[in-house]
Image (cartoon, rainbow, N blue to C red):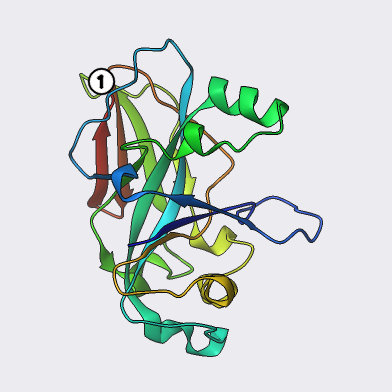
Amino acid sequence: MKILGLLDNYGAETDGRRPSVMQLTDASLLQSGKPFFIPSDNHDYEAFPSVAIRISRLGKSIPARFAHRYFSQATIGLNIRDMDRLRELSQAGLPWAEAVAFDYSAPIGTMVDAETVFDPRSRIEIDLCDTEGNPVCGQVVYRTSDLIADVYSVIEMLSQRFTLKEGDIIFVGYAPFPIPAKIRHNIICRLGSQILLKTKIR
């Protein structure tokens, strides 16, 4: 199973740059309801949200007009990043997978019907609460309508370089607004009244 995530594909001007791709590992996935344990390194951690899809059939070099045949489920997910290590590696010009693709760095929600998630009217509301359920900061909203390249174009682009297989996960566009990931925080992501993802930070 491959896990691919797109950067520079949400909401901001990119001066025509092609979205960049990072690859996570199977061990990066963390299912909804499971806690994320902050490593004991005193680093700053932040979570970046993205809608994710699950590939449902084998495909290579898929035209965008046929991309709808290759997925039927979607959800919201996060990429929890070690921001201190990410800055160090970026400044040194070194690969930064260590800072973004470590074990359990990718909490992922319950898969639901993709048409619901990608409805232009849909909004995924992300709340950060303390252990008592009190808001820690303002609500964040993720809209799939704010993706620069839509999900069909993303599948077309990725399938030029990767053979997409059943079960592969694609995070189609990480939002540039980070969510603080600190001990005793709870991150809750809702689509309407349905909770798709709940992650306790410990």
Residue 65, above or below 32: below
- Quadrant where the C terminus sits is top left
Residue 111, above or below 127: below
Residue 184, above or below 163: above
Q: Where residue 163 appears, x then y in whole percent?
A: 46, 75
Q: Which residue is mark 1?
A: 202
Q: Residue furthest right?
A: 15
Q: Nearer the viewer, residue 12 or 123?
A: 12
Residue at 54%, 64% in the rendered image: 145
Q: Nearer the viewer, residue 30 or 25?
A: 25
Q: Nearer the viewer, residue 172 or 104?
A: 104
Residue 185, above or below 26: above
Answer few, some or many: residues within 10 Å of disc 1's Cα (few below 14, many 20 plus, some between 14 and 19). Answer: some
Residue at 20%, 19% in the rendered image: 132
- Quadrant where the N terminus sits is bottom left
User: Is 175 on the left or on the right of 39, as rendered?
Assistant: right
Q: Where residue 84 appears, x then y in whole percent?
A: 56, 20
Residue at 33%, 21% in the rendered image: 38
Q: Where residue 133 appears, x then y in whole percent?
A: 23, 24
Residue at 34%, 24% in the rendered image: 135
Specify the quadrant of the image occupied by residue 89: top right
**Amino acid type, residue under disc 1 in the picture:** Arg
